[in-house]
Structure formats: C-alpha cells, structure tokens
Image (spheres, rainbow, N blue to C red):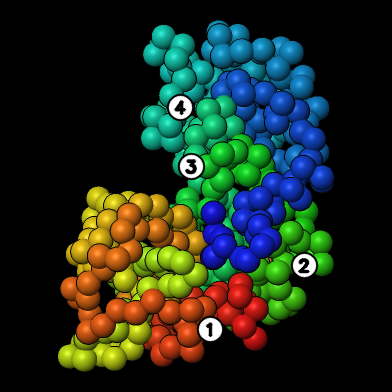
Amino acid sequence: MNRIADAPGKPVATPQQELLTWYAKIGRDLPWRKTRDPYRILVSEVMLQQTQVDRVIPFYLRFLELFPDEKALAAASTEAIHRAWKGLGYPSRVERLRGACQAVLARGGVWPDTPDGLRELPGIGPYTAGSVSVFAFARVVPVVDTNVARVYARRDGLPLPIDRDGVWSHVATQVDPHDPIAYTNALMDLGATVCTARVAHCDRCPWSHRCVSRGNALVHAQTANPLKVEAKKVAYGVEVTDRKKPRRHIVLALIHHDGRYLVAKRKQDQHLGGFWELPGGKREKGEDDRTAIAREVLEELGAEVRSARALMSFHHEFDDRYLTFHVYRCHLFDPAVVKPLASDALKWVTPEEFVALEFPPANAPIQDRMRRYHRLG
Ligand code: SF4
C-alpha cells in the first residue's frame, strides 16, 4: 500500500512494511501478544483502559491463573473478582468484564468476531471492540487510541481539532491487510515509545522520511493529545474551528499506466475551471471508498477500475465545509478507453509534468507527495 509508483529498478517499501520491519526489531514483548484467545485479549484490554502497561502485567498473569477462561470468570462471585482486581483501580471494570463473559456464554460460548458484534456485549466500547476483533480474529479494522491518533495526526498533517470519525476512517485505509495484528501492535508501540505525547523522537522513527511534521516542535505540541484537543475546543493556543460545518469525503483516483498518470481538466464553466485534477468525487452514503472510486471512474472516464490501493488521506477546510480527500492509486482494465465524460480534456503526464500542473489549492498535498516520492525538488 501507499507506493506511489514503481520506482525504476528498486522496490520501494510501503509504509506498512517500514513499520513492520521496525516492529520486528524493537516491538514490545507483552504477554497478551502471545495469545489469540478473545477472553484473554479482552482481559488485557479492560485492564489497560486506565492503567499503565508495566503495572498491568503482573495483575494480568495472576488474574488468568484464577480465572483462566470466560466460564471461570462468569461463574465467579463478586467478592472473588474484586479481590483479584484489588490494586488495579476502577473496580467497576471487572464487573463489566464478567458481564461480557456471561453474555458470551448466553450466546452458547461463541464470541462475536466483528467490532459491531463485539459492541453488542455489555460494557464494550468501540476501541475495545476493535482491539479484540483485530488481536483475536485478525480482522482488518482500525483501532484508534490517542497514541494512534497522534502518530497519524503528525505523520499526515491531519488538521486540528481531530475529527474522531475522520481519524477512524483514515486509519482504516492504512491497516496492513496481510498482518493487521502486528501492524496494530506496531502502531501502538510507535506512539508509546517514539512518537510520544511529550517528545517525538523523529530520528528513531521508521516513518520520518514520509512525515509532514518531522522535527516540527510546534506541531508536536499541538498534537500531543489529539483526541483531547477536540474535547477541549481550544488547546495549545490552536483555535478550534467550527464543528457545525458539514464534512464530506472525496475519493480521488491516481491512475497509473506505463509510467504516466491520468489528469483531467476541469470544465471552464465550473468553479476553478481550467485547473487540472484527479478523477473522482464525493463518496455517497452507504458507499465505501473503492465502490465510490469505481463509480466515479466509470462516470467520468467510461473505464473500469482493475485495482485501487489506498495511498493517502488529507483534509482541507473551506469557509463552508470540511473535505477529507482519500487518494487511491488505481489501474484500469483498459487505459485506452478513457474519455473526458466530465471534463474538458484528459491527458497522461509524466511525474515531472504532474507536479508542474496547476491543481486546485486544496489538492496541493498530492503534488507535494509526488514531488517527494519522485525526488523532484
Ligand atoms: S517523524 Fe517524528 S513526528 Fe513524524 S511520526 Fe515519526 S516520531 Fe512522529
């Protein structure tokens, strides 16, 4: 994923590969990373909700000796579970945990494996549901806590205040489909040990070459706790923008063929007529990105998409709305059939021509990315 083009001669690591390579060398060895048992993973997630990792480890190991599976916990007395939890704090957590186990047993002992299904269990919120879904069932779904939001806010320059839905959908485009477990663990380790709230150790970061905030202390301070920024409305001197503005998601197709990219010229009678842009448009209700891309490409070019890989997402604030752009690198079944059905002209351009074209200002991050990738100064 996120490979802009096939660099001549040398394979280019994807962001996912870069992170996984880093994780293979320095990832934390934690007991709950050695199991795929949903019960044991849920125990760890609930313990970690308000307690530091180092403190959780001995409690986790002892708790599992006492209550090795959901049946044992579901049948335990209130007194016994509180005794086992003593010292961890927030004791209502263990009652919620037991309630979830009882609900699983009431379903015949079958654990739901999707975030939506897990959220039907009592006391399970979106973060915990995502975590269990990934770590127990290897589902390719996003899991966003403040560490994860911080890393993406910094790496990709997400605007503040962070929009919770926006960051979840942004992370959803980034999860490694081949190894979501390692990828999610790696992301959490990166946020906990390298891209931390207090300091960003950019010199140790596997993504430093692709991070728009590398070495920028002001942005690091502004994004230290990105999910809290939203809650406070004003934080770190950053004025929180109008949250009543509508938010739209725009999908764009960076169509690649034979070393060139396809660009379309906006119609003269449109806003920003004469500017060049990527084919694409608004994601409609009920569509996912790839469905929207396929529809837009068919409508605007008369062509069918063969493959679409998530490349980047970024945001732009207008006076009356926020737009989140999701760019996909696409190949067509037959590049020769494209026609300018919704534009004044189409052309296939080299990377050098691409970065020299006049794009709408909101699309500048795409040209910046191409410039960096192709080392065009
Ligand atoms: S380069 Fe620095 S700011 Fe960017 S993701 Fe890495 S540690 Fe965080």
State if disc 1 and disc 2 touch (CB < 8 Å).
no
Assign a secondary structure to mark 1.
helix
Assign a secondary structure to mark 2.
helix
- Give the foreground label among 2 and 1: 1
Q: Residue at x 48, y 42 (%)?
A: 141
Dot 3 amino acid type: Val
Q: Which mark is residue 156?
A: none
Neighbourhood count class around disc 2 (C-alpha, 10 Å): few under 14, some 14–19, many 20 upward: some
Q: Which quarter of the image is occupied by the N terminus? A: bottom right
Assign a secondary structure to mark 4.
loop
State if disc 1 and disc 4 touch (CB < 8 Å).
no
Dot 2 amino acid type: Cys
Q: Is residue 191 left or right of residue 373?
A: right
Q: Which mark is residue 352?
A: 1
Q: Which mark is residue 202?
A: 2
Regarding residue 342, the answer to whether it shows in the image is yes
Residue 151: % across, % down: 64, 60
Please give the residue where the numbered disc 3 appears in the rendered image: 141
Which quarter of the picture shows residue 32?
top right
Regarding residue 327, the answer to whether it shows in the image is no
Dot 1 amino acid type: Glu
Q: Is residue 79 left or right of residue 4?
A: right
Asked if ligand 1 lies within 8 A of label 4, the reply is no
Please give the residue where the numbered disc 4 appears in the rendered image: 113
- Give the foreground label among 4 and 1: 1
Residue 287: % across, % down: 27, 52
Asked if ligand 1 lies within 8 A of label 2, the reply is yes
State if disc 3 and disc 1 touch (CB < 8 Å).
no
Q: Earlier in the sequence, mark 1 or mark 3?
A: 3
